[in-house]
Image (tube, rainbow, N blue to C red):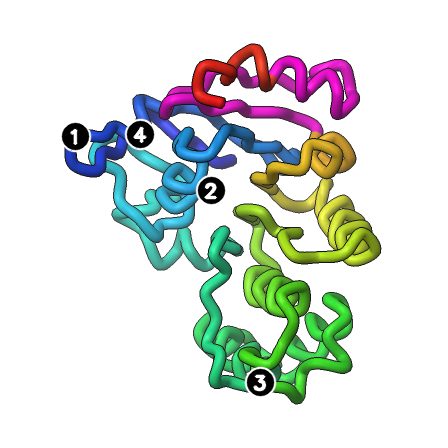
Amino acid sequence: MIEVKNISKSYGNHLAVNDVSFTLKRGEIAGFLGVNGAGKSTTLKILAGALNADKGTVSVFGNSIVNDALQAKQTIGYLPEDNPLYGSMYVKEYLLYVAQMYSLKGTKEAVEQIVEQMGLQGEYHKKIVSLSKGNRQRVGLAQALIHNPRFLILDEPTSGLDPNQRMEIREILAGFAQSKVVLFSSHILQEVTSICSRYIIIDGGRIVFDDTALGGTASSIEDTFYKLTKKNV
């Protein structure tokens, strides 16, 4: 279980995240929604341990993201919105580097498996800087998944992908539904409705909606989203 309790984060005088709390359970793919500047990415960075909250706690399968950071982060796969990669490295070289950071046994096999899973067979021998945006996104997803994490944090994971690629990624994520916790942030509501079983909406740094059903369609989510966030649109 992932437990987020009363986390807050300020940047100067701006309160980006304001007393946010929620829990996530295994087998749950939760959509994390909000307008630009609502506090989505800041919250995701805190959950991933990439940013410290000013107040509050995050527990990842019983491990504090601050006090037990190494144990917690071993169970997390994180794809940030900006997908930072080492452009001068070859794809295979980069994925081997990531696998070694997690001290995986059989790093070569792990890389081969994730390359096939993410459809990077034609790209793994290329430098990352030469890849299309869509294939760089695939590499970012590959590094988040290579160690078979129990908790996936994905911030706009299908950005830059074409419709067929987005469908493939949705199928991969749907396959994790029973074995992992997935927190999925996207501006594409059709994608959210296609894979998510729960919807969390953040607005002005606060959680304003958290439920398992919104009518089951993109239009119903869009209507609810607009009603709750229209003051900031």
Say if 192 sits above or below 137 in the image: above
Select label 1 or label 2 by which is in front.
1
Judge the density around disc 3: few (<14), some (14-19), many (≥20) Cα neighbours within 10 Å.
some
Judge the density around disc 2: few (<14), some (14-19), many (≥20) Cα neighbours within 10 Å.
some
Cα separation, mark 1 vs mark 4, equals: 17 Å
Cα separation, mark 4 vs mark 3, equals: 39 Å
Callout 1 touching callout 4 (CB < 8 Å): no
The residue stretch that appears in magenta? 197-224
The earlier-in-sequence mark between 1 and 4 is 4
The earlier-in-sequence mark between 1 and 2 is 1
Answer with left or right where residue 196 lies relative to residue 130: right
Select label 4 or label 2 by which is in front.
4
For the residue labelled by badge 4, is the local secondary structure a helix, a strand or a loop?
strand
Residue 144, located in which quarter of the rendered image?
A: bottom right
Residue 127 is tagged as 3
The earlier-in-sequence mark between 4 and 3 is 4
For the residue labelled by badge 3, is the local secondary structure a helix, a strand or a loop?
loop
Residue 7 is tagged as 4
